[in-house]
């Protein structure tokens, strides 16, 4: 309950400030340009190919959006000196982390909802498989959730928002590039690195309109581990 109250307050903060709308507008604009230039491409493309291209590019913008949203969650509290006030309140560290994460996830879901018009444009000259759309958006939400959780962890480590964005980006790029390590190492390490890959191993099925339980579990596990780590960082800072 306390986590939900924190989430509500944090989300209201996003919607009251200009920065939230700027992030939303800029990423939507660039995503729309990529959709028009690369996903739609030539008129000879099939609808399934257009949708696949849309989810391909949108996955990258979802990760970027998660970094921009998460960088202020905890780092801003340290930067402005309001973190001790949170520590003094009768709220557990896990409620603080969970509340701020849920607020960021709600804002990320709002961004994804605003992109719905793009796949619906395919209906103008083609047919849309709503199962494909649903699977793709589930993948984007899970990818965004995992990226946002990693960003929350990075935000808990940083003293300001810029450092939080850098920490988060480095960790996410490392997870994305695990597939390269999988290609140059031998088993069983190659299997481990392949399973850890944030995008290459787990998102393409969603992009193609398929839902695999292992991919859903992977993103949920990354989300849980990152939020658990962020909670431990807050606890360590509280007792310093």
Image (spheres, rainbow, N blue to C red):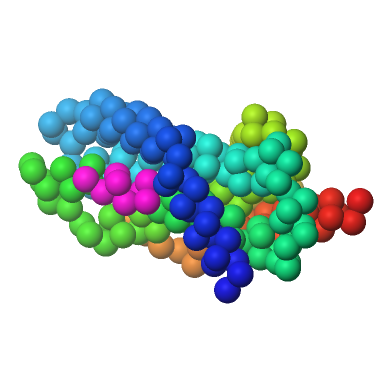
In the drawing, does residue 69 fall left or right of residue 170? left
| Segment colored magenta | 110-117
Question: Is 178 drawn above or below residue 10 in the view shown?
Answer: above
Residue 112 in view, yes or no? yes
* Rendering coords of residue 113 (x, y %): 32, 51
**Image location of residue 177, percent across then percent down:** 62, 36
- Name which quarter of the figure residue 97 lies in: bottom right
Counting from the top left corner in percent of width and height, residue 163 is at: 69, 31
| Residue at left offset 77%, top offset 59% | 88
At horizontal 53% and vertical 37% (from top left) the residue drawn is 68
Residue farthest toward the left in the current orientation of the protein: 125
The total number of labels drawn is 0
The front one of 90 and 155 is: 90
- On whether residue 115 falls in the magenta region, the answer is yes
Residue extending farthest to the right is: 240
Most common SS among magenta residues: helix
Is 120 or 96 nearer to us in this picture?
96
Of residues 210 and 223, the one drawn nearer to the viewer in this rendering: 223
70 relative position to 60: left or right: right
Residue 16 x/y as whole percent: 43, 44
């Amino acid at each position: 309950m306390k986590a939900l109250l924190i989430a509500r307050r944090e989300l209201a903060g996003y919607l009251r400030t200009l920065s939230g709308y700027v992030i939303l507008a800029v990423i939507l604009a660039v995503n729309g340009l990529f959709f028009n230039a690369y996903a739609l491409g030539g008129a000879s493309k099939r609808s399934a190919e257009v949708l696949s291209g849309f989810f391909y590019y949108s996955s990258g913008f979802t990760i970027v959006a998660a970094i921009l949203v998460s960088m202020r969650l905890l780092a801003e509290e340290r930067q402005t000196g309001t973190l001790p006030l949170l520590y003094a309140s009768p709220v557990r560290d896990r409620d603080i982390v969970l509340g701020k994460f849920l607020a960021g996830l709600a804002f990320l879901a709002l961004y994804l909802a605003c992109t719905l018009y793009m796949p619906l444009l395919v209906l103008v000259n083609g047919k849309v498989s709503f199962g494909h759309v649903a699977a793709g958006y589930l993948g984007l939400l899970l990818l965004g959730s995992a990226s946002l959780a990693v960003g929350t962890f990075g935000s808990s480590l940083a003293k300001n928002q810029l450092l939080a964005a850098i920490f988060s980006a480095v960790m996410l790029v490392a997870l994305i590039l695990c597939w390269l390590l999988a290609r140059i190492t031998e088993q069983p390490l190659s299997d481990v690195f392949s399973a850890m890959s944030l995008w290459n191993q787990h998102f393409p099925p969603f992009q193609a309109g398929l839902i695999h339980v292992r991919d859903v579990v992977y993103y949920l596990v990354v989300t849980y581990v990152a939020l658990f780590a962020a909670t431990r960082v807050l606890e360590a800072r509280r007792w310093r």
